[in-house]
Amino acid sequence: MKRIPASIAVLVLGAAAVLLADNTLSINGAGATFPFPMYSKWFDEYHKKNPNLAINYQSIGSGGGIKQVTEGTVDFGATDGPMSDEQLKAYQDKHGSGILHFPTVLGAVVPTYNIPGVNASLNFTPEALAGIFLGKITKWNDPAIAGANKDVNLPANDIVVVHRADGSGTTYCWTDYLSKVSDEWKNKVGKGTSVSWPVGLGGKGSEGVTGTVKNTPNSITYVELIYAEANKIPYGSVKNADGVFVRASLAGVTAAAAAAAKEMPDDFRVSITNVKGKGAYPISTFTWLLIPAKFSDNAKRDAIKGFVAWMLADGQNFAEALSYARLPNEVVAKEKKALANIQ
Amino acid sequence: MATSSTTLPSAGPAAGSRSFLSRLRDGDEVARLITFLFAATVVLMTLLLVFELWQGSVLPRHKFGLAFFRTSTWDPVEEQFGAIPFIYGTLVTASVALLIAVPLGIGAAIFLAELAPPRISDTLEFFIDLLAAVPSVIYGILGVFIVVPLMRQYIDPALKSVLGFLPLFQGPAYGVGFLTAGIVLAIMVIPFIISVSREVLLSVPRDQREAALALGATRWESTWKVVVPFARSGILGSIFLALARALGETMAVAMVIGNDPKISASLFAPGYSIAAVIANELAEATSELHTQSLIELGLVLFLLTFILNGLARVLIVVTSQRGAGSATA
């Protein structure tokens, strides 16, 4: 239901922009909600530098972004999870040319909890997180949790699992991580923007899950790092692939991306959860712009290429102020080369 | 409508033989056509809605067929979709809501229409209309911040200790769940029941009351045995209006039902409703089958509302015959 008014809004905004100023080129995009604050900052800054170009972005969700760019109702899309091979094929079949992924910034997902009497920041092993969310670890003082938190007195209370009920890129990143660290999770649940949860209560949106956790003693959930930071929500550390407990930080996320950059495929469709690297935070993800490889409108093509080039250079400096992790230099260099593929 | 326009007093005896052109000039025919078009759009919209929902759910209808109504797995990753937990959640929450709202609402309406002084009745009516106009997301917020903690800390444990022998009130109480969703829905639909029932009760002719009083009935006897049965069909209408709203309510339910597609006997358990899952998952549904299964759920909700409305019609016809009979007897 959300999708339809949003697309109308895109049209109305687009039409308004055209009517107000004939010589302004307006470009429409839609997609992921997670990077929305970053994108609106970028589009605003870029518009100040280039008054003749207005980029409108509707944060309707990754799924909606992929659909609309495939339908051709927007000029570019944005997503928190890379497009699947089937989706790429669907695009190719419809347009006769491909679509390219461009990573823009990085985000992380952190475990957060409410245990009365426990104020310490807890350490979570991958086994503990998978066990809790599979419903196999049901008490807070289970050895799998207590073993990594020797100096914390954990109660023998039942764990209440809380997860996102609405489809979201946050869930995609979280379940992608759990699928990598637990075969049982991979076989039983898998990864996706919405999954069939073995246990737990569903909250709507980041505010829904954090609200439920705040209200429910002995509960645990996951939120984006940026949301936890903005709302001063305490969160735990997670053991990474090198066996080090890492508390999520922007540097830790960029470190994960840099570690993954060596094996970055040419189409940038890569998951960076659980990568090796001492300081790498394991539940991290890129977020991508989806840009058609072929434009029929040269002015739009040049404008988008110009924006991406700026985003990779000056634009990155805005990231940290908004709690997003910037791209590592290796990835920036690779993306600059890939820009030539837009025709 | 054509016949009624010919019997207008101003049209005179020759009206029936007026030519089409003269009727067109007088505006009767124009008015008829225009209002007919307006009325037709309602039918057209309904048909279009069903058509779109039907067209939009081709994939799951072919893939799952009737199994869609028999299975209870909802797994977007494995692309297995079954509607039972959502139908169950929708019906259970709506039933809980009506069980609470009907006695409260009708009781309040009787007080306002029959017993309260007119000034108090009118003032309260103003507040009730105000409540009916509050957006549902506000009720959702109220539910999350007030009802949920209240349920978890006080109401659920109290129910468990008194009625815990019933399967309905067993298991862990998280605060969110069927019961909480039902209570929030009840709060939302009570204004509808009060407002419509009060109007219906007020429109019962004075003669009915006076006749009962003249026969020696007390005030309460005349209200309960004469006025309420007389107004029965209108009161039932208000209940079905409330049911329709309870079935389709989205935001407030999504915020307090717990969003877990499971069927549990316990009212404390988290569940899911049709409208809530559509609102939650449609925006980020990435596969076509997932999107279309959500659309098919929309079709199911439409059918459910359609069937219940049909039953309501039948019930109203049956009871209004009986109601009229008992009132005239």
Image (cartoon, coloured by chain):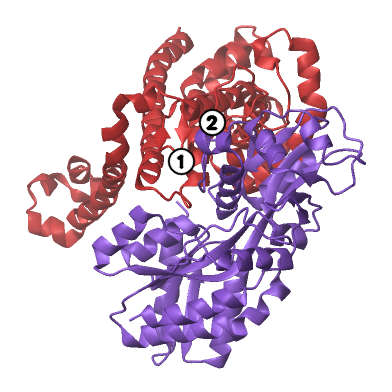
Chain colours: A purple, B red
User: Counting other residues with Cα less than 10 Å from the Cα at mark 1, is it few (<14), some (14-19), or many (20 or more)?
Assistant: some
Calculate the distance from the C-alpha at mark 2 to the C-alpha at mark 1. 15 Å
Q: Position of residue A323 (x, y in %)?
A: 71, 68
The residue type indicated by label 1 comes to Val
Q: The residue marked by circle 2 belongs to what chain?
A: B
Q: Are marks 2 and 1 in contact (CB under 8 Å)?
A: no
Q: Secondary structure at mark 1?
A: loop
The residue type indicated by label 2 comes to Pro
Residue displayed at 53% across by 80% down: A333
Q: Position of residue A19 (x, y in %)?
A: 40, 84
Quarter where residue B328 is shown: top left
Mark 2, residue position: B261
Q: Secondary structure at mark 2?
A: loop
Q: Nearer the viewer, residue A334 or A110?
A: A334
Number of the label disc, if any, that sits on residue B77: 1
B212, above or below A14, in the image: above
Tell me, yes or no, if residue B197 can be seen here. yes
Q: Are marks 2 and 1 on the same chain?
A: yes
Residue displayed at 56% across by 37% down: A183
Q: Position of residue A33 (x, y in %)?
A: 56, 61
Quarter where residue B140 is shown: top right
Residue displayed at 79% across by 50% down: A236
| Residue A89 placement, left or right of A139 | left
